[in-house]
Image (spheres, rainbow, N blue to C red):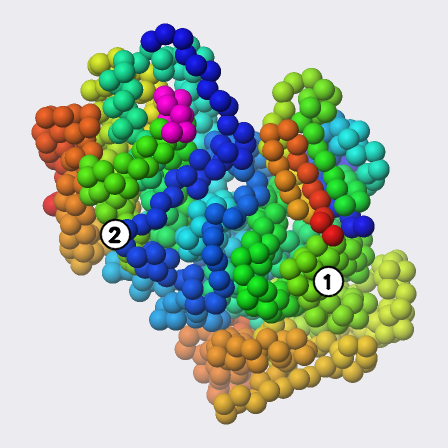
């Protein structure tokens, strides 16, 4: 029997799940972000301690020095749950694909001045390893952090960084070939230019506090690297010298950074606003990792900026400081 | 520049290799064992991570594209289902109890899988398995969320699901699925992969998703069918990962074989015990049945698992030892489980009922060797009692198995009228088990399983009453207090389906749709 | 002999994919179940891009199968041109 059920008006018994109602009130339906995020992680009565970390519970607030009364105070301003996230990325991917096609089909890679192409290969391709480290680090924050509001965006971020590493690989294959990837990896492993940055990445891979790792990777390193490489060097300096096609190939990264920093800033802001203690811990971490990141990026930026590297890096550090002050952590 | 030389186009495998493992490097500023601290202690020997064969070779661009397509479709259907009061199209309101079981028992596990694969996806030194695990991690949060989003609309109209996160961490029978996944997640990363990636995903999830979801479709639940099949499309990738992991570990070193065999034995049994809930859903909770638990077990475990273990025989892996006992139990499992929940309906977050005559006929035809002889007389008696106003609700607490945490209701293999008990003395305590297999699992790792948070013990210790409860006052009703602690409302969330608000509302709402008032 | 199988959702997109699979695996058995189609074959099942493309009249990437895939069994080997499910034993 097929009945026309649309004609039935029935009053729901409740608008959402109790855990959501306890947080937002029982009188209204919840968003998909809220229902997919709030209290998703188990909270109590774990059965066994991890054999790989017997000093902690499965999910344990004590893995971090950051203290929160409620780890669901964090909110992703993009309100990403999986569906919203993948659909957003699929759209960006369409644009990126169109850009790659445009550059490829019109042979624009071949029109690049040699100097620009060499600079791009030398600068961008080793960065695929940095993105790979960022993938690992965000996986770790997701795995060992506390509360879905904090950890969920990290798995998206981890996969984004893998995507970025893969876009950079495609840039390498488009402007060069498989040998260019090998050459870049060799530079990453051996050239002095890259050793500071590689050491930075490897040092973050052993961090155990998930929030410190979030700061070292997402706040400090990417907070300097993206404005420096994608906004300043590619979109600005190289574009002025005929490198616009490269800017098309890295548009994803530029847009992505503009989007994700809103979430990163919101996270820092919420943690800092929680307590003076958090603010102090955050400021210490940010300063320490910012200084290391700035020092590690300086030789890398020289590849494209030459003598202007110091001046522009300093400028970017200043912008970063202003950004952190706005997020509630004056440095 | 002059003529551009046409570049060689990379094939799928080469392209995927530069897109994943090409990104990795051997560190020199930090030691491998500090970057990957969890990979050695289980005793699994890996000599060459490069031997890893990637199963599906999805790069992120393709991943986003196809997953977004799935999500668009899924949410369009959920929206339509909700807008049209699709819940009133299910065969009857009894079906919705299967949905309650799903969201409180299964969906939270999807979330744990998400975190577990993030952990595994960080822990392995090999870039190939790391990427595959992370892709599974993000898929699993998808499953948790699409289930919550699909079932959200049911929660608006029906009882029992309103505080499912809270319930999952506390309600007695939900400790069965919860402890299963806690067990896997607290094991080392290799065991986690064998437990979840292989034993659960490859050997057992077909039993959960395919017949059950097909059953949802059959019962008019488009919402569940859609998320179920949509999740299952990811499962196909996960299953392939599970199989690759096993083959990879086994190929790396012969010393790995006995370790892996022990894990397969353990996790097939652990997973099978959790599927008790599924057996009961299939045989009792779907008003229109598609196939019996026994048939599903025969197709998806005996036939398909048989082919799998034949394939793995070349490594020296054999069919899990528990398969023999499971074969003996398949005529009894769902009936014994349903009888238990029928008894404990006062303490659960869903309703139970006695099957009607047609359903008994179906059960008898599917279980010719057991149903008429053992279970029909029992049900007939309970039905008569209920008709006389004596619907029985057990209010005493059952003894639980220390490992699977299911009440000790199962019978001796081959002796379906004799309850099976096993026990072990360890340190100063006595531990109880439902079977030789659970007992063996305990004996292999007593330090782990003595930690179990057993709901019945916890209730007796006074840990499952609302704060400030005084159990010494006159008229203290322990069940009532435990229900408060569970945040379940007596008379609405529990008891028999026949007297439930769900049944009454469903009939009324359906009535509105078919009459002109 | 062991059975390998693949199951797909029943819809407009999979109709021709299933036809292609049947063409390439003449001994395969097609089981129609509620909302899904399960295709069983002995030891080996191959899905060819070209056959699908001929039937649907447009380029097809085998990874598109992901969207409508429900389950499968057997070892998997996938290239740009074909996807093979097989048992060794």
Numbered disc 2: secondary structure = loop
Question: Within 10 angstroms of label 2, few (less than 14), some, or many (20 or more) residues?
Answer: few
Q: Nearer the viewer, mark 1 or mark 2?
A: 2
Residue B288 on image: x %, y %: 80, 51
- Choose between B491 and B36: the one closer to the eye: B36
The answer to whether residue A69 is magenta is no
Could one spot residue A79 in this view of the protein? no
Residue A125 on image: x %, y %: 32, 31
Numbered disc 1: secondary structure = helix
**Residue at the spot x=58%, y=50% of the render?**
B244
Q: Which residue is mark 1?
A: B280
- Choose between A294 and A173: the one closer to the eye: A173
- Is the stretch drawn in magenta largely helix, strand or loop? helix
Q: Is residue A23 left or right of residue B250?
A: left
> Picture quarter containing residue B161?
bottom right
Residue stretch in magenta: A171-179
Q: Quadrant of the C terminus of chain A?
A: top left
Q: Earlier in the sequence, mark 1 or mark 2?
A: 2
Question: Within 10 angstroms of label 1, few (less than 14), some, or many (20 or more) residues?
Answer: many
Q: Which residue is mark 2?
A: B29
Residue B32 on image: x %, y %: 34, 56
């Amino acid at each position: 029997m097929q009945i026309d059920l649309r004609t039935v008006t029935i009053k729901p018994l409740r608008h959402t799940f109790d855990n959501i109602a306890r947080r937002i009130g029982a009188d209204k339906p919840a968003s998909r972000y809220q229902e997919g995020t709030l209290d998703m992680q188990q909270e109590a009565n774990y059965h066994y301690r991890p054999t790989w970390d017997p000093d902690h519970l499965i999910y344990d607030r004590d893995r971090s020095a950051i203290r929160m009364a409620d780890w669901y105070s964090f909110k992703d301003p993009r309100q990403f749950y999986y569906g919203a996230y993948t659909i957003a990325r699929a759209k960006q991917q369409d644009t990126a694909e169109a850009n790659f096609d445009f550059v490829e089909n019109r042979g624009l890679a071949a029109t690049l001045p040699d100097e620009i192409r060499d600079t791009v290969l030398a600068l961008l391709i080793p960065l695929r390893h940095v993105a790979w480290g960022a993938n690992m680090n965000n996986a770790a924050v997701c795995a060992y952090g506390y509360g879905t509001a904090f950890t969920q965006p990290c798995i998206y971020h981890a996969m984004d960084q893998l995507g970025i590493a893969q876009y950079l690989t495609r840039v390498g294959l488009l402007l060069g070939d498989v040998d260019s990837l090998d050459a870049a990896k060799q530079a990453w492993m051996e050239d002095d230019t890259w050793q500071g940055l590689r050491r930075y990445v490897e040092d973050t891979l052993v961090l155990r506090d998930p929030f410190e790792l979030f700061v070292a990777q997402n706040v400090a390193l990417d907070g300097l690297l993206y404005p420096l490489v994608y906004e300043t060097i590619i979109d600005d300096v190289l574009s002025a010298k005929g490198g616009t096609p490269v800017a098309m190939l890295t548009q994803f990264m530029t847009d992505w950074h503009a989007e994700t920093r809103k979430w990163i800033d919101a996270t820092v802001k919420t943690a800092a606003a929680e307590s003076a203690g958090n603010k102090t811990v955050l400021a210490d971490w940010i300063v320490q990792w910012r200084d290391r990141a700035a020092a590690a990026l300086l030789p890398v930026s020289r590849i494209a900026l030459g003598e202007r590297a110091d001046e522009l890096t300093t400028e970017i550090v200043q912008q970063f400081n202003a950004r952190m002050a706005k997020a509630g952590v004056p440095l | 520049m002059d003529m551009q030389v046409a570049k060689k186009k990379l094939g799928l495998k080469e392209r995927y290799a530069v897109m994943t493992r090409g990104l990795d490097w051997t560190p020199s500023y930090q030691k491998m064992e500090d970057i990957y601290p969890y990979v050695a202690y289980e005793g699994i020997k890996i000599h060459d991570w490069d031997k890893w064969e990637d199963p599906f070779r999805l790069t992120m661009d393709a991943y986003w594209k196809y997953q977004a397509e799935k999500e668009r479709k899924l949410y369009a259907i959920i929206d339509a289902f909700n807008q049209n009061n699709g819940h009133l199209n299910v065969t009857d309101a009894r079906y919705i109890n299967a949905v309650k079981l799903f969201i409180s028992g299964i969906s939270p596990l999807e979330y744990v899988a998400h975190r577990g694969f993030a952990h595994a996806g960080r822990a392995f030194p090999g870039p190939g398995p790391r990427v595959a695990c992370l892709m599974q991690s993000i898929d699993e949060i998808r499953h948790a969320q699409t289930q919550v989003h699909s079932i959200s609309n049911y929660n608006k109209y029906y009882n029992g699901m309103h505080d499912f996160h809270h319930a999952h961490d506390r309600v007695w029978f939900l400790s069965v699925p919860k402890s299963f996944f806690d067990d896997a997640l607290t094991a080392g990363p290799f065991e986690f992969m064998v437990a979840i990636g292989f034993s659960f995903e490859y050997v057992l999830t077909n039993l959960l998703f395919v017949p059950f979801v097909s059953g949802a479709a059959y019962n008019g639940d488009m919402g569940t069918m859609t998320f179920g099949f949509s999740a299952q499309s990811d499962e196909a990738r996960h299953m392939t990962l599970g199989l690759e992991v096993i083959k990879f570990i086994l190929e790396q070193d012969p010393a790995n074989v006995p370790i892996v065999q022990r894990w397969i034995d353990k996790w097939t049994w652990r997973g099978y015990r959790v599927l008790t809930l599924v057996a009961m859903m299939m045989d009792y909770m779907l008003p229109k049945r598609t196939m019996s638990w026994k048939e599903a077990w025969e197709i998806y475990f005996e036939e398909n698992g048989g082919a799998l273990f034949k394939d793995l025989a070349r490594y020296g892996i054999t069919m899990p030892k528990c398969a023999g006992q499971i074969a003996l139990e398949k005529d009894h499992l769902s009936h014994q489980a349903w009888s238990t929940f029928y008894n404990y309906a006062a303490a659960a977050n869903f309703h139970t009922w006695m099957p009607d005559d047609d359903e008994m006929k179906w059960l008898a035809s599917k279980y010719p060797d057991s149903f008429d002889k053992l279970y029909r007389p029992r049900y007939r008696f309970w039905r008569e009692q209920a008709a006389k106003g004596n619907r029985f609700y057990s209010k005493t607490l059952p003894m639980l198995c220390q490992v699977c945490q299911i009440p000790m209701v199962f019978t001796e293999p081959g002796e379906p009228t004799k309850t099976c008990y096993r026990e072990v003395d360890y340190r100063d305590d006595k531990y109880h088990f439902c079977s030789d297999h659970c007992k063996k699992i305990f004996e292999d790792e007593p330090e782990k399983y003595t930690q179990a948070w057993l709901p019945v013990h916890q209730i007796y210790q006074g840990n499952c009453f609302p704060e400030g409860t005084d159990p010494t006052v006159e008229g203290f009703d322990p069940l009532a207090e435990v229900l408060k602690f569970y945040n379940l409302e007596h008379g609405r969330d529990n008891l028999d389906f026949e007297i439930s608000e769900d049944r009454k509302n469903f009939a009324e709402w359906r009535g509105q749709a078919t009459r002109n008032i | 002999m062991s059975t390998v199988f693949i199951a797909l959702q029943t819809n407009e997109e999979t109709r021709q994919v299933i036809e292609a699979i049947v063409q390439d695996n003449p001994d395969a058995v097609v089981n129609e179940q509620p909302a899904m189609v399960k295709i069983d074959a002995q030891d080996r099942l191959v899905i060819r891009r070209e056959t699908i493309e001929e039937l649907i009249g447009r380029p097809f990437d085998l990874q598109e199968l992901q969207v409508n895939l429900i389950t499968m069994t057997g070892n998997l080997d996938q290239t740009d041109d074909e996807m093979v499910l097989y048992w060794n034993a």
